[in-house]
Amino acid sequence: MSNKNIIAIDGPAGAGKGTLTKKLCDYYGFTGLDTGSLYRAITLYMIEKNYDMDSLDITKAINATKFISDNHEILEYAKNPKIRSQLTNKYVASVAKIPEIRQIMKQYQIEFGNNPPNLPDGSKAKGAIIEGRDIGTVICPNAPVKFFITAKPETRASRRLKEYLDQGESASYQEVLASIIARDEADRTRATSPMKQAEDAILIDTSENNKEATFEIAKKIIDERLTII
């Protein structure tokens, strides 16, 4: 493992993984990866390149995945708001279920941790932060710092509802809460790489913490365990 500064962040949807990852990356000069956006990024790439998404050629889909992951173009697509569009939502499941693509993404995540790409300004990253559901258990089981970020379903539903409303989308609290609970159950019980807290992961419950408090808790652990130059 060439990069020793790896931080694995796991946890359910809406717990604050993304916010914490961004704040830590900005502070330490790390490169971050939201693994949940990867399949959406691949799907958006193929949509914008006019692939026939209704009769998707598996070989072409695999080659597209290799192409945008090899040159890290996938990271740019992952930042595009269109990955959350209704059109992307329509096709992402059919892309994500292709075994060869899942294997490519698994290897991409492992390689990202071992050799993180440069920062947006071209400077060398001092480490990598990878967030998802199985990072500490499957992707980076030897990461020196692991966090499991969680919060009460009700708290996460309120946060997600605010995001939807801020974006001008209509939604009800009960609908969002039901979706959160269903997603948690699906993530915990799936056969392949279920969401699970690694035995050596630090649990942080953000139900009562604001962003700064969560950041300070994580920062203290990181400063104790990593030597960042």
Image (cartoon, helix red, strand yellow):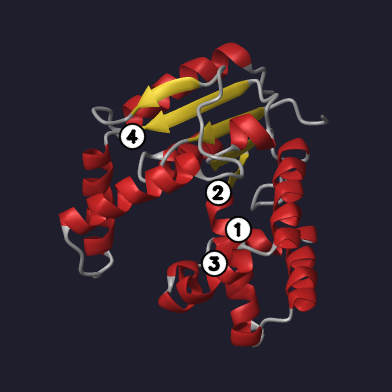
Residue 93 tag number: 3
Query: Who comes first in sequence, dot 3 or dot 2?
Result: 2
Report whether residue 58 is seen: yes
Q: Classify 96 as above or below 49.
A: above
Q: Residue at x 41, y 28 (%)?
A: 215
Residue carrying label 2: 34
Which of labels 4 and 1 is toward the front?
Answer: 1
Secondary structure of residue under mark 3:
helix
Q: Label 4 sits on what residue type?
A: Lys
In the image: residue 11, left or right of residue 128: left
Type of the residue with mark 1:
Leu
Which of the two marks, 3 or 2, is nearer to us in this view? 3
Q: Are marks 2 and 1 in contact (CB under 8 Å)?
A: yes
Residue 38's tag is 1
SS type, badge 1: helix
In this view, the residue in front, 117 or 177, is 177
User: What residue sits 24% from the left and 70% below the top?
Assistant: 168
Q: Residue furthest top?
A: 224
Q: CB of mark 4 within 8 Å of CB of mark 3?
A: no
Q: CA distance from mark 4 to mark 1?
A: 25 Å
